[in-house]
Amino acid sequence: MVCLLVASALICLASVVTAEAASAGAAVVPAAALAQRGPTRGWAEKGPAAAEEEVELIFALKLQNTAELERILERVSDPSSPDYGHYLTKAQADHLTAPRHQDVDIVER
């Protein structure tokens, strides 16, 4: 189980992954989800993967400023707005919604 302190909240990311499931490219099932709804069909806890096996984990961080992004999208889509048609570039949208640096640092540690 990996626990992160993000934005003053403790987030525990635990996954039940068998070596067989990981090698088959199966999705990771958070342990918290299993606890809430019981065992997921097709998944079984088999313990830790062998030391020589590689298990890939993907962490997703919450986008920031989504309300501001929505306001911008509404303005650029409204013909009566002076911002109409002035769309954000991908770089501008990425910068606006990028996760906080401290959150990235916590995951990378």
Image (spheres, rainbow, N blue to C red):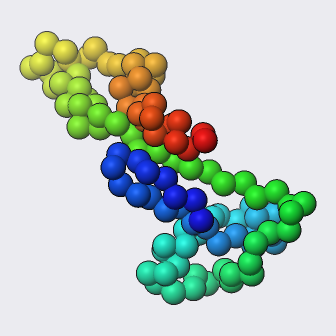
Residue at the far right in the pictured view: 52
Residue drawn at x 58%, y 82% is: 40
Is residue 70 shown to the viewer in this render?
no
Residue at the far bottom in the pictured view: 38
Q: Is residue 62 above or below residue 72?
A: below
Residue drawn at x 34%, y 36% is: 64
Residue drawn at x 41%, y 33% is: 100
Is residue 19 shown to the viewer in this render?
yes
Q: Is residue 44 above or below residue 98?
A: below
35 or 102, nearer to the observer: 102
Percent of width and height locating residue 21: 75, 70
51 or 70, nearer to the observer: 51
Q: Is residue 50 left or right of residue 77?
A: right
Q: Quadrant of the C terminus?
A: top right
Percent of width and height locating residue 81: 12, 18
Q: Is residue 3 above or below residue 17?
A: above
